[in-house]
Amino acid sequence: MQFGSKQFYDYYEAAHQDSINRSIHHLAHSLAIAGTIILVFKPLMGLAVIAVTFCLSWAGHFLFEKNTPAFFETAELSARNSIFHYIKVAVGGVFWTICCFLRLFNLGPLTD
């Protein structure tokens, strides 16, 4: 699945059907951006914020969506590919949130 492709966004849409889970993810992705900025100035605080965002997202999947987060779907990946998978999932989530925001204005790849 190529990052940023229609298949990629369709996968995210399908994995986040519950409205509470979607809201939790959008909050977590916004916090992840803030955590990345904080990381530059206060590394430990930035890492803590980023860690919280993962916990929020995973809780959304387990509690509301009742599915496994894509972050844990690495059984068939090599160690090197796993790292890229984790990065793709994390960054892809942020891009998905941005696309969902753009969809409010009938813009971006999630509009028909």
Image: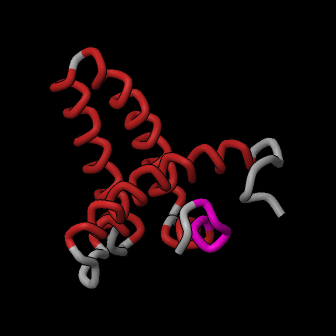
Residue 19: where, in percent of width, then height? Answer: 54, 58
Decide which of 18, 52 is in the foreground and name it: 52
Decide which of 7, 83 is in the foreground and name it: 83
Decide which of 79, 21 is in the foreground and name it: 79
Which image quadrant for residue 79? Answer: bottom left
Instruction: Give the magenta part as a residue range.
Output: 4-9
Residue shown at the point (32%, 65%) measured from the top left: 71
Which image quadrant for residue 3? Answer: bottom right
Residue 104: where, in percent of width, then height? Answer: 75, 44
Q: Is residue 62 left or right of residue 64?
A: left
Q: Main secondary structure of the magenta part?
A: helix
Q: Is residue 45 above or below residue 15?
A: above
Residue 59: where, in percent of width, then height? Answer: 29, 57
Q: Is residue 69 left or right of residue 17?
A: left
Residue 43: where, in percent of width, then height? Answer: 20, 24
Farthest residue to the left: give it.
44
Which image quadrant for residue 46? Answer: top left
Q: Is 111 included in the stretch rendered in magenta?
A: no
Residue shown at the point (25%, 50%) measured from the top left: 55
Farthest residue to the bottom: give it.
76
Q: Is 5 included in the stretch rendered in magenta?
A: yes
